[in-house]
Amino acid sequence: MRIRLDNILLCVLWLLAVTLGTCFWFNTVFGFDIFSASHWQYVASLQAAQTPIKPGFYVSMAVAIFITIFGLYLVVRPRKRRIRLPIVRVSKQNSDSTSATNNNTQNVPVTPAPIANNDASTLDIMGAEVQPAPQTPTQPTPPPTARPPRLVLPTLNGNFMSAHQTTTPARNIAQQQSESDATTLREIFSGAGYTVKPNTRVNGIQTALIAIGTNETMWLGCVGVKTTDVRAIIEKFQQVFADTLDETYISVNGFAVAAPDAATSEFQDILMFNKIDEVREYMRANPNPPTPADDDGMFDAYSQYIDAVITHIGKI
């Protein structure tokens, strides 16, 4: 249970209200001033002399004490937060059509692309076709069988195959580099005590890291993405939080590694790093605080809520 200033002020206010109410009740019904020492001495002398006192006096005193303790309990008791998980409704017709499309896609045969033959054997055949057939002057020979002319395509279909073969390896290298950066970031935040969550694509942009920590904190990072796009992703998460949470505020910390607009960025709340090693040094200096002993399972509920939000945003 955390000690909060607003709880202390509410307790003081409740004690004052109960005290004033009790004073008014005893003055009106019994003519007894609870702030007067002489009145308490008089009650003590009656009890010592075994003089009967109205039972309502003791009942009123007990009720006042009970109301005071019960009100203080209601103020300081631990409250469990209500987290409403978003519900994604998927119709049966859409799911059937999606499964049918996937099955048709799996059954379509893949035709390999033709491979141009530029080896030395083709050049030899061309040379053989150009040479004329030998002729004898004494006996005419039938003309050699003419082969159809060889179709020479201009530079392999306008360099289409060449461009495709050049772009595909570059794309694979970029994808492998992105996956390597995401793996490194996951290891950095796991070592700093944070709980790493699965990445998702938001607004058409793939995130490199999503992690959560204690005190309802969340980290979101991208590699090679503009800070404006990172801010748009954070706002998308905050909108879902505002629509599904009543009283809980989740703090989202965003960062970008090698952002193209780092020199002209206007967002002061988004951390910018030139390389991943700088992220490692920053997280060593800012590890995740340990979970408090009175957590009562709130962090597990928070973790499950973030999983549901990531799944929901990934389907939007």
Image (cartoon, rainbow, N blue to C red):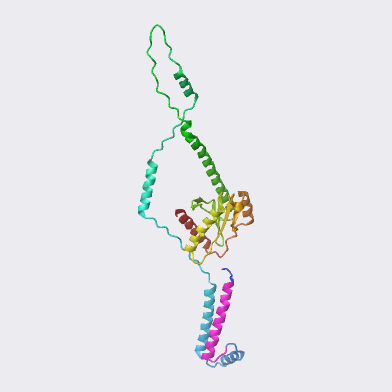
Taking depth in this image into account, of 200 and 76 the one nearest to the observer is 200
Taking depth in this image into account, of 257 and 62 the one nearest to the observer is 257
Taking depth in this image into account, of 229 and 37 the one nearest to the observer is 229
User: Which quadrant of the structure image shows residue 219?
Assistant: bottom right
User: Which quadrant of the structure image shows residue 292?
Assistant: bottom right
Taking depth in this image into account, of 52 and 115 the one nearest to the observer is 115
The x and y percentages for residue 134 are 43, 12
Q: Which residues are magenta?
A: 5-33
- Relative to 228, is 2 above or below? below
**Is residue 303 among the parts visible in the rendering?**
no
**Is residue 28 among the parts visible in the rendering?**
yes
The x and y percentages for residue 3 are 59, 70
Q: In the picture provided, is 7 more to the left or to the right than 86?
A: right
The x and y percentages for residue 112 are 43, 35
Q: In the picture provided, is 312 more to the left or to the right than 13?
A: left
Q: Considering the image in quadrants, where does the C terminus appear?
A: bottom left
Identity of the residue drawn at 36% across and 54% down: 92
Residue 130 part of the magenta segment: no
Q: In the picture provided, is 144 more to the left or to the right than 59?
A: left
